[in-house]
Amino acid sequence: MLNQVAIMGRLTADPELRHTPGEIAVTTFTVAVNRSYVKQGAERQADFIDVVAWRNTAEFVCRYFKKGQMIAVTGSLQTRTYQDREGKNRKAVEVVADNVYFTESRGNSGSNAAGGTGYNSYADEKETNTSYSAGSVDDFTVIANDEDLPF
């Protein structure tokens, strides 16, 4: 089975760090993600996706991200049910963040500059460079002109 989610969008509010009774750091935040299509004659729509981050990932998000900043999140989708104050059953769907990444340079908040530095909850390193701009010519295969292309 596979449960992987990758989203990129803008934070709708400043993330706030909280702690459980057992002193585990946690934060929840919402990411506004533009849909990839636009209906003819309409404006582009966005989805507002709830994300929860735990421990060091939560601390990283709260320390380095602010409202309006672009963020990339990878993790898994989780659903849970609960009762609201009126006793009605409700269902929550959220992304549990494994990794979060900066997607723009510090001076370019609000632009589309790609950065790619972030926090990986599976590693002990706080800043993991995931930029793919360090490729070399050896990464590509030369295709002879007389060969049929597969597309």
Image (cartoon, rainbow, N blue to C red):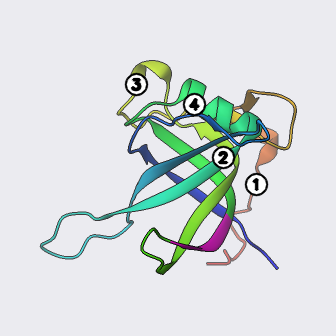
For the residue marked with disc 1, what is the amino acid? Val
Asked whether the residues under the numbered discs 4 and 1 touch, taking CB atoms below 8 Å apart as contact, a structural biologist would say no
Residue 62 - label: 4
For image coordinates 46% across by 51% down, the residue present is 30
Choose the circle earlier in sequence order: 4 or 2: 2
Q: Nearer the viewer, residue 134 or 77?
A: 77
Q: Nearer the viewer, residue 131 or 7?
A: 7
Q: Which mark is residue 142?
A: 1
Q: Amino acid at mark 3?
A: Asn
How far apart, in angstroms, are the residues tagged by discs 4 and 2?
Answer: 10 Å
Q: Are marks 4 and 2 in contact (CB under 8 Å)?
A: no
| Label 3 secondary element | helix
Secondary structure state at the residue bearing disc 1: loop
* Residue 134 makes an appearance in the image: yes
Residue span colored magenta: 77-83
- The quarter of the rendered structure image containing the N terminus is bottom right
Q: CA distance from mark 1 to mark 3?
A: 37 Å
The answer to whether residue 109 is above or below residue 148 is above
Q: What kind of residue is marked 2?
A: Ala
* Mark 4 or mark 1, earlier in chain: 4
The residue indicated by pointer 2 is 53
Counting from the top left corner in percent of width and height, residue 16 is at 52, 35
Q: Amino acid at mark 4?
A: Cys
Q: Is residue 81 magenta?
A: yes
